[in-house]
Image (cartoon, grey):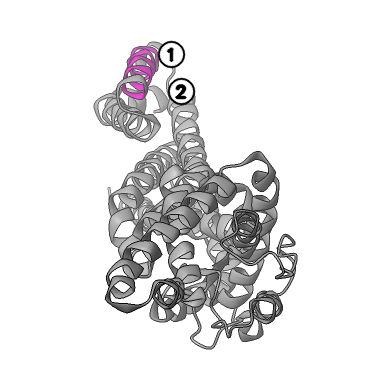
Amino acid sequence: MSSSAPPARRSRGRSAAAGLLGLLAVLAILVASVVGTLHAVVLSPDTLTTVLAPVGANPQVQAVVADRSAAKIVTQLDIEGRAQSVIGGRLGALMAPAIARAVQDRIASAIEGALGSAAFEARWEQMVHASASVAIKVLKGDSAAVTTSDGVIYLNVLPAIGSTLDALKTQGIIDASVQLPDLSDPATPAQRAIAMLGSALGISLPPDFGQVAIAQTSALEAAQGAVSTFDAATPILIGLAIALVIAAVALAVDRRAIVVRIGIGAALLVAVVPPLLRFADPAISSGLASPGLSVVASALIDAIVDAVSWPLRIVAAVCLAAALVAMAGAAAKRSTVVLPGLVGVVVFIAVWVAVGPDAALLALGLVTAGAWITGRPRLAQATA
């Protein structure tokens, strides 16, 4: 009796230690998956360009960018003042604002048309890549990449404005003798392009002309700190997750059981992240967006969340697959897992069709967890 007590206590101690390591492994898998995926998507100019380029085809984004750009053009060209001086008197003072607004609407319509044209679509990806490269440099603390003094990240829409100004010149709104510079190359430094345009128009343009603000300074500083942490933590977290899983499995008395628990736990936690990100989307957008640009920020955040969601779903699916394989291997009679497996497949397909992939993964995880809890005694007998 007494001789069997120490081994039993040791077995319970191993099980408790393995359980603790398994819990830490689940949390490490969750954090490593989220951080690693965000790092791979957000901090790669090529990947980020692939993710964000389709945002330019969003009609709401085009309308907002066109309206903001048109407002700046009208202000800098002093359309209202010119109209008032041409008409003169009280009539000029009364009509000038309406004329300026009409010109702004025409410019916005022209910019929106340029943004939606096939010709501009080819340039858009280059613009996004250039802006993404600058943004990532800024996020990594390269202050030299910032072209303005207020530390805000901007999207350069000067190529679209250049096409619009050419159209306005053709329509006679801009004097035909004005030699407008070529602004079509997104690789041209923004400040150089602004200086050339100001010189051609004979006016002084602000340093942010043709630049659509994407993030506020406070949000940028917070993002820089997060990126610095991401860079340092990503490989450590991935290595830690792998090490904890290996340690938990090696220490466990019932290794299949610990694999099942880690797999189900990690799958459920990782699968719930994409829905949580979508739920937080409005708050994130409002926190990042400059005034009047919540539509643009929301579209950008939506694109990033979509890109991040699929790798997380794959991680959750792999974790579930590992749990199911371990459950099947633990059963002497395959009938103990066949019925739950069929139920899980039916539920997974039905929920995917009715709701979506995230809910489907969560439903499959819950079915798998229920099958493990209810079938655990029989599985234990089978492996005894």
Q: Quadrant of the C terminus?
A: top left
Picture residue at 38% right of the left edge, 63% below the top? 99
Q: Is residue 14 above or below residue 145?
A: above
Q: Can residue 107 be seen?
A: yes
Q: What's the magenta region?
A: 338-352
Q: Is residue 133 above or below residue 268?
A: below
Give me the disc on residue 245. none
* Residue 307 falls left or right of residue 358: right
Q: Position of residue 238 (x, y in %)?
A: 56, 59
- Label 2: which residue? 328
Magenta: main secondary structure: helix
Q: Look at label 2 and name its amino acid.
A: Ala
| Between 360 and 257, the one nearer to me in the picture | 360
Q: Look at label 1 and name its amino acid.
A: Arg
**SS for callout 1:** loop
* Residue 36 falls left or right of residue 103: right
* Residue 332 falls left or right of residue 285: right
- Closer to the N terminus: mark 2 or mark 1? 2
- Label 1: which residue? 334
Report if residue 161 lies within the magenta region.
no
Q: Can residue 21 be seen?
A: no
Q: Are marks 2 and 1 in contact (CB under 8 Å)?
A: yes
Picture residue at 43% right of the left edge, 78% below the top? 85
**SS for callout 2:** helix
Q: Is residue 135 above or below residue 124?
A: below
| Between 211 and 321, the one nearer to me in the picture | 211
Picture residue at 49% right of the left edge, 57% below the top? 107
Q: Position of residue 199 (x, y in %)?
A: 68, 81
Report how far apart the C-alphas of labels 2 and 1 lie in the structure.
7 Å
